[in-house]
């Protein structure tokens, strides 16, 4: 078990999905958050839906008073580069014997200054996004016995991981053994295993997705719930989405959509309608292994109750699919609606590899 | 200018598309091919459509008699691993001061034994597939002035590179300045620049595709012709295909199809009809930047003349698009048919990045 100090200077309130995910879902404890822009308050004061009274402090040095065992980089900046002004804080933590946990594309363990300091102080650096060597996709995922449900989205950062974690919890509470499969840095930090598929060499991204499903299957779950990535019409990240769509060999898809999003996060490409998203994903799956969208999980964060209900009703009407906001209304109802639809499907060929 | 010895033991006749591409299209000369299974013959004897009288020899030592300046790894094995039995020949070449050129995923320059030998003998190792650092996709490709034509295919290894090289040559012979953009190892060896997009980290594969188009645009061509990769329904490589489809921001697509292929090379997933391939690519492009398929280049290799003509007529009838085999019939006719359709298209948003 780790005791986390989370580094998110200037970004904890609004732009720290890694921090929020770990605080909400990890079994590791967060003892402090470093963000001078809201220092002196508690986590709950700054982000009300995070039920934590951990203090927000101004610096790593201040956070050390709460005896963290690890410093976690709590944001996922575009492109995954380390902001240079964060170096000093990281070095302070290392000098105090505190482990570093990072999901950046920049590998902190390969940074000469951090590596030397870590060696000197006997500290480990866990670069969560560092991919293992994986084989090419070979079709072994087609033989997995448990139905595989993959989250797809109307954009990146809409709540795909959150929805799958909530559904897995609801399933377990109803007595079903559902295994959550992390495919990105925050999910890996929460679950303690996984591969950041966006960091894998393109040729091997489907292979990495397949290995994740095979690893989950080794635990003999009843259901496999895979965190999705990106969006199929995202101008930059769509290839990662497609890698999961083919590599995980899903039997069913869950559409996760932020109802407020009209264009891609930090890009201007417009989002697609729910109906179009359903069609597009199903058409692609139909070329390799058919899979249908079985439900819609909406992110209605910030909306009044009545508006949220309207959005949920609209999604149901547009697609004739079960739809709900699993954070607002709990995940039990959506899980009950989709679980009966999670049945194994066959690929177009019995094996991918001839 | 290099003088190549090409290493393709046991594979030159049938399974050495890198060797064939370099011999046919590179301005560098091939002075010998190493393949004991057909040693004693000439390149033309073994592969009639390659108009080269270079000898095929049994070993790298034999090839050295023809004074090569570089040893080129002439095959692209699945997964890109170096067959261990090839190590001795590579070390022989290095010991003789011969440069190594490789398109494998395995980076030969990072192999301790090869690196040490190269240092000792003052030899360079060009790992063609080693990707440069590239930024995330940002939408700059939308501003490129020349129309961008991207090849898409009914499978990998169907002739996308060959078709684009032939079309670029035909365009130039008709007085148009058409720039070929290499996106894979063989294309890079032929053109002397490019990025192997399949080797780029998934998150950056669209960014790499964009950089390739921007680099081509710097040369102020009238047309930009991008070599495609994989296939949109390939169970393993589809993410690379999608990276090019979004990242290159094409204005038009050319469908390249091997008429004999009924399932994916080394995979059993069935190929799609021409009509379905046209629809699927156009639907995906329509979500970010619309682009239409403007023609079909068929690979009818090995068919009798009459059967080839039938296949070409069938493709035209199925899609109402110009179709031809540019290797069999020359590329001028297809180029004349598609060039008027190569006009700039607008993305759904004027800029990708908000």
Image (spheres, coloured by chain):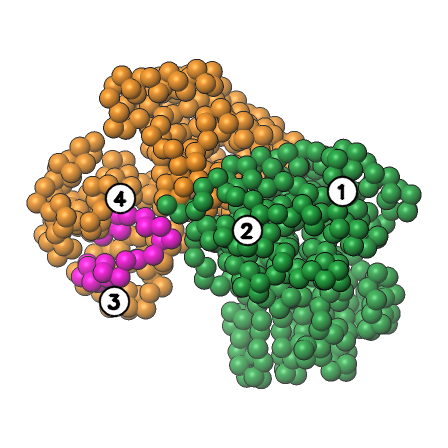
Chain colours: A orange, B green
Residue B280 painted magenta: no
Q: Where does the image place residue B136, in percent across and percent down from the top left? A: 43, 53
- Asked whether B178 or A134 is in front, the reply is B178
Say few, some or many: other residues with alpha carbon within 10 Å of mark 4 (under 14 / 14 to 19 / 20 or more): many
Q: What are the residue bounds of the magenta stretch?
A: A71-93
Left or right of A218? Residue B298 is right
On the image, the x and y values in percent for residue B54 come to 81, 73
Asked if disc 1 and disc 3 are in contact, CB closer than 8 Å, the reply is no
**Eye-nearest disc, 3 or 4:** 4
Name the residue beneath numbered marker 4: A16
Horizontal and vertical percent position of residue A89? 19, 59
Q: CA distance from mark 1 to mark 3?
A: 64 Å
| Residue depicted at 77% across the width and 82% down the height | B65
The answer to which of B161 and A242 lies nearer the viewer is: B161
The chain letter for the residue carrying disc 2 is B
Q: Quarter of the image holding residue A288?
A: top right
Q: Nearer the viewer, mark 4 or mark 2?
A: 2
Label 4 chain ID: A
Q: Mark 3 or mark 4: which comes first in sequence? A: 4
For label 1, the residue is B322
Q: Nearer the viewer, mark 1 or mark 2?
A: 1
The residue that mark 2 highlights is B248
Q: Chain of mark 3?
A: A
The span from disc 2 to disc 3 (Cα, nearest Å) is 42 Å
Q: Which residue is labeled 3 in the image? A: A117
Quadrant in which the C terminus of chain B is drawn: top left
Q: Give the alpha-carbon distance from disc 3 to disc 4, as whole Å.
A: 26 Å
Answer few, some or many: residues within 10 Å of disc 2's Cα (few below 14, many 20 plus, some between 14 and 19): many
Q: What secondary structure is found at the residue carrying circle 3?
A: helix
Chain ID, mark 1: B
Q: Which image quarter is the N terminus of chain B in?
A: bottom right
């Amino acid at each position: 078990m780790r005791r986390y100090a989370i580094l998110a200077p200037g970004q904890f309130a609004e732009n720290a999905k890694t921090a929020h995910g770990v605080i909400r879902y990890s079994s590791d404890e967060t003892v402090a958050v470093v963000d001078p822009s809201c220092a002196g308050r508690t986590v709950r004061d700054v982000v009300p839906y995070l039920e934590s009274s951990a203090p927000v402090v101004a610096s790593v040095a201040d956070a050390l008073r709460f005896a963290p065992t690890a410093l976690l980089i709590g944001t996922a900046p575009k492109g995954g580069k380390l902001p240079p002004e964060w170096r000093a804080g990281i070095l302070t933590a290392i000098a105090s014997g505190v482990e570093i946990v990072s999901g950046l594309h920049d590998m902190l363990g390969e940074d000469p200054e951090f590596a030397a300091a870590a060696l000197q102080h006997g500290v480990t650096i866990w670069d969560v996004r560092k991919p293992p060597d994986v084989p090419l996709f070979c079709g072994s995922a087609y033989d997995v016995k448990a139905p595989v449900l993959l989250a797809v989205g109307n954009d990146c950062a809409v709540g795909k991981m959150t929805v799958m974690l909530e559904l897995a919890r609801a399933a377990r509470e109803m007595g079903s053994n559902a295994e959550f499969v992390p495919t990105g840095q925050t999910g890996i930090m929460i679950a303690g295993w996984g591969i950041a598929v966006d960091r894998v060499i393109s040729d091997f991204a489907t292979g990495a997705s397949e290995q994740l499903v095979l690893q989950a299957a080794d635990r003999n779950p009843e259901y496999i719930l895979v965190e999705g990535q990106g969006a199929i019409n995202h101008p930059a990240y769509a290839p990662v989405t497609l890698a999961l769509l083919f590599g995980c060999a899903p039997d069913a898809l869950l559409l996760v959509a932020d109802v407020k999003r009209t264009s891609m996060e930090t890009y201007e490409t417009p989002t697609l309608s729910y109906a179009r998203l359903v069609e597009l994903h199903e058409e692609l799956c139909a070329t390799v292994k058919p899979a249908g969208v079985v439900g819609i999980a909406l992110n209605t964060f910030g909306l009044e109750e009545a508006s949220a209900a309207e959005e949920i009703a609209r999604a149901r009407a547009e697609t004739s699919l079960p739809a709900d906001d699993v954070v607002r209304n709990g995940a039990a109802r959506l899980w009950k609606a989709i679980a009966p639809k999670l049945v194994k499907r066959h690929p177009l060929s019995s094996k991918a590899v001839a």
